[in-house]
Amino acid sequence: MTHLSKFVILVAFISLFSACENDDEQSVNTEEVTLSRTTDYGEDWIYFSFSSGAEVSGVDNSNYQTNTSWDIAFNRYNVRTNGGVSGSGEAAAIDAGEVNYDTVFEAPESGYMLDSSIQIVESIATMPPTMMASNGNILFIGTIEFSGPPPVYAPNNHIYIVKTANGNYAKIKIIGFYNDLGDSGYLNFKYTYQSNGSRTFE
């Protein structure tokens, strides 16, 4: 084999290695999201996909349990994931606790909690509010803490690991309950999504 041939092979190997590194880098995506609207009390949910990085349209109370295009959904300060009683996907969650977001490097292999029955507010026309049964993930109860009057909504600063509907992984932190104008009811969160099936977030 000539020196030129060896050089060409070496260059090709380096290019392939670099391409693989770029693919790994592109597999992890971190974004911050503010939901497009508030949700009403009762069964009014906004469905979100980590893979598309967007809210999912066409999902409602009639089809959410069979639709696998969404990973996580929000109703006021309630959360459901696409698994267990809430969906036919693989989604479930773990509460990593009140830790620094950047120190959560890897999703655990096991220990995830599926959705079950939870209580949500149906109406605030009376005090105390009227409650109703719904489907959701109990790990997220208390994610938004209320105090007042006047009403103040603050996140609990916990980091959650979510196994997505298709078996990938995301970490998420609820960072607020207000939009840019200071109006309450607009849930916002930061998330990091790993699209290649790995449990690492680097």
Image (tube, grey):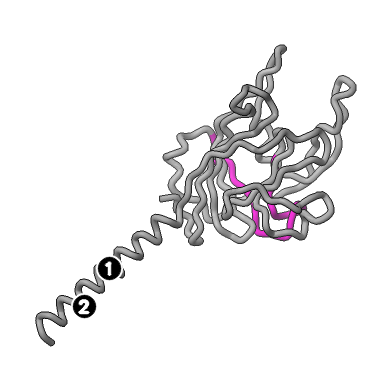
- Amino acid under label 1? Ser
Q: Amino acid at mark 2?
A: Ile
Q: Which mark is residue 9?
A: 2
Query: Would you place residue 123 above or below residue 54 in this image?
Result: above
What residue occupies the far bottom of the structure in this picture? 1
Percent from the top left, x then y, of residue 110? 56, 54
- Farthest residue toward the left? 3
Q: Start and end of the magenta stretch?
A: 79-97
Question: Residue 197 location, x and y as percent?
Answer: 51, 61
Compare marks 1 and 2 and give the one earlier in the sequence: 2
The image quadrant that residue 129 belongs to is top right
Instruction: Choose top left, top right, bottom left or bottom right for residue 15.
Output: bottom left
Q: Is residue 181 above or below residue 68?
A: above
Q: Residue at x 16, y 82 (%)?
A: 5
Position in image of residue 13 (x %, y %) = 25, 72
The residue pinned by badge 1 equals: 15
